[in-house]
Each structure stands twice: as C-alpha cells, then as structure tokens.
Image (cartoon, rainbow, N blue to C red):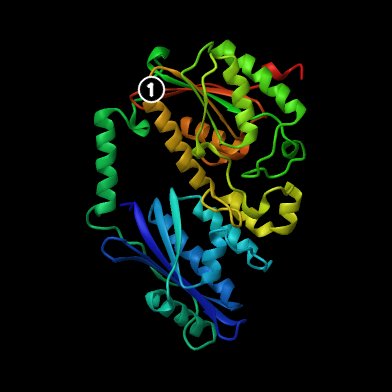
Amino acid sequence: MAVRAVVVEADGGSRGNPGPAGFGAVVRDPATGEVLAERAEAIGTATNNVAEYRGLIAGLEAAAELGAAEVEARMDSKLVVEQMCGRWQIKNPGLRPLAAQAAGLVGRFASVRFTWVPRERNKHADALANAAMDAAAGLAPAGPVVESPRELAAPEPAVREVAARAATGRATGTDPATTPASWEPRPTEEATRLILVRHGETERTVQKRYSGRGDVPLTDRGRAQARATAARVASLAPSVAAVVSSPLARCVATAEAVAALVGNPPVRPDDDLIECDFGVWEGCTFAEVREGWAGELDAWLASTSIAPPEGESFVAVAERTGRAVDRLRKAYPGETVVVVSHVSPIKLVLRDALAAGDAFLHRLYLDTAGVSVLDLYPDGGVAVRSVNDTSHLADL
C-alpha cells in the first residue's frame, strides 16, 4: 500500500573528484525507521556533486514509486541542500540539468523538505554510495543495488492521521476535498463572496520585470485602471463588508480607489496577501534571470516548493494566502469582501479554488486590474464565478 510520508537519505561521492563515482539512497518510514527501499549505483567517472545529485534523484524516484505524498530529504551535502532550497546559486552548468530533474520530481509530491545532516547521521546512504564507488573503481561487481519497495503491514501514524482528518472533514462537511460534488445551483446569499482584484499597472509590469516585495507605485495608466476597476467592482457589489489589501503601495492605491465607490470602508492591510518574495531576482527581467540563474530558474519553474535564491517558494505563498482566505470566510459569512493583491497570490487562490494542479499557475494569465470572483460556502464548497474579467479596461 502507498505510504503518506517518508524520509529519504541520500549520498554520493567519487574517488578523486572526478573519479570512479557512485550514489546511495535509502527510503525510511519516519515513524519506525524501517527501510522501505534502497538504491545504489556505480555511475562511472563523475564529481562528488554530480553523484550527490544522482543519489537525491534516485531517492525521490523510489519515494514516488512507494506512492509517498510528503518527503523529508536528508543529505550531508550542504551544496545540494542549499541549492535545492534556492538559497545558493547553481554556478556549475553540469549540475543544472540534475537540479532541474530533481525539482521536477519534487513537484510530484504534496511537500518536500530538505534537511542537512552531519555525515554520521547519514551512514546507511554513505555505505551504499561507497559500495557503488568501489564498483565503479572495479573493486566490486558494477550495476545497481536495489531493494524492491516493500509494503507496510499496517497504516503507520502519519497515514492514520490523514485518514482520520479526512473522515472528520466528511462528517462535518468542512473539508473542500471531501465535500460532495454537485451540479445543483447553490444560493449565493449563503456564501462569502471574494472579489479578487490584481493591482493596476506599474513600471515593472510594463517592463516585464520580477516585482515582488519592491514597493513600486502605480503608473498614470495604473491609476486610471484602478478607477475603472472600482467602477466595475461597484457594479458587482454596490456595498461590501470589507476591503482588504496587500500592504504594498500599488495594491493600497488600487484598494482605496475601489473603497471610495463601495461605501468607503477602511482599507485593511493583510501581510498574508503580499506578493511572492523573488529574492535576488527582484527587479530583473525574465531574460536577465534566464541568463544569470538558468539552473535555478529551471528548478523554480519545475516545482512550487523551490524558492528563487534568497526568496520564497510558491508553497510558502500558498500557505499564507490560504490562511488569509480562511480568515475572510470565517469573519464574513454571507457577505462580500474585496481582496486586492498580486498576480502570484491570486493565481494560487484560484488554483486551490479550482482544485487544479501546479501547471495551472503557468497557464493562467492575469492582467493588471483584472477581476475574479469566487464564492466560499460554509461547508467547504467553492464556486468560481469569473476569472480575469478585464471588460472595464477596454477603453484604456
């Protein structure tokens, strides 16, 4: 049977750097420490870092074969851990394809956490890697050393916890993942309606630059977009219970324009609605990032758990935007709330509302000052009413 959570221990090395190289990986049950799978292979002549990445890839592949949803990847390679977390640049072009491959595997799991451990806590993977290096050097038979994945006899605590949580959600009707599907129209007065507004144009959106935590103002056209958006929101909801906004100036200015036409409620800032932190990419064009951080960019595009160097992953953004949405649903039952935010938080809210995969994030385009509407029901039901409405911007 599939397991919910696993620990992957991985290592790799070479005799000579570069030299005869090999890797080892172990997949364990986090509760009992039981070995669920092993992988080891001689890979010919390679560097330590290449072998370490190959070990990580093999461990993630084994975890995927076991059906794991959550992974903690433990390695004694500081370089691989820091690069996979997005904190260190991948300067060696030979490592970039391997990092991208690992990131692609990361995207197959619900969550992956990377942890550096000292070598003495990685002895099993280290022993497998050393045996593989011996094989590469002709000191032992070459080829993969594989222990087939084994099923556990009974659900472990992590699995039982997930099953219990799902059962509770079904019983109370509060878990969106287990809310019964239905074509039946639902009364809108029961729902908390969120009118999601992306801020108006800035110089960085015009220049197609990464614009995260930098506090850039609206352009003249952006201010005109904000006024037009305010009129559009007022036509959808002449009065609203609240207007909440990212604290950055481009959102606050857009939110204030909207508030003035919907009963003038105070604009309430919410830090959980702020844009993704793009780290060292802030202010760079897409082409500049591709030129300077090709490997990191490929890894970031391949997995929402990977952060830009010194930045924030989309997994982290989704966690905080989820908190914000949940607070609004609980605080304003049956009422309408305007939420003014940025492209990444709004995409993630819509992804989760539509129960879509991560590919949705790269396929959905959200214009500046675009409007999306979704209804959140007390039982966890969601109805997406519109996405990226820009009809009010046609004359700008």
Return the residue nearer the eye: 253 or 100: 253
For badge 1, the amino acid type reads Tyr
**Residue 264 percent across, percent down from the top left:** 55, 17
Q: Is residue 305 left or right of residue 192?
A: right
**Residue at x 59% of width, y 86% of height:** 16
Q: Quadrant of the C terminus?
A: top right
User: Toward the viewer: 41 or 248?
Assistant: 248
Position of residue 344 in the picture relative to residue 383 (left or right): right
Q: Secondary structure at mark 1?
A: loop
Q: Is residue 375 visible?
A: yes
- Residue at the farthest bottom position: 139
| Spot occupied by residue 305 in the image (x, y as percentages of width and height) | 51, 51
Question: Which residue is pictured at 31% across the width and 61% down the height?
Answer: 29
For mark 1, what is the residue? 377
- Where is residue 277 drawn, in percent x and y? 59, 47
Label 1 Cα neighbours within 10 Å, binned few <14 / some 14-19 / many ≥20: many
Coordinates of residue 228 in the picture (x, y in percent) = 68, 18
Q: Of residues 207 and 250, which is closer to you in this image?
A: 250
Residue 196 lies left or right of residue 167; in this view the side is right
Tally the numbered discs. 1
Q: Residue at x 54, y 86 (%)?
A: 137
Q: Is 189 placed above or below 371 here?
A: above
* Residue 41 in view of the camera: no
The residue positioned 54% from the left and 64% from the top of the image is 82
List the single residue furthest toward the left.
Answer: 154
Query: Looking at the rendering, which quadrant does residue 146 occupy?
Result: bottom left
From the viewer's perspective, is residue 333 above or below residue 140? above
Q: Is residue 31 left or right of residue 227?
A: left
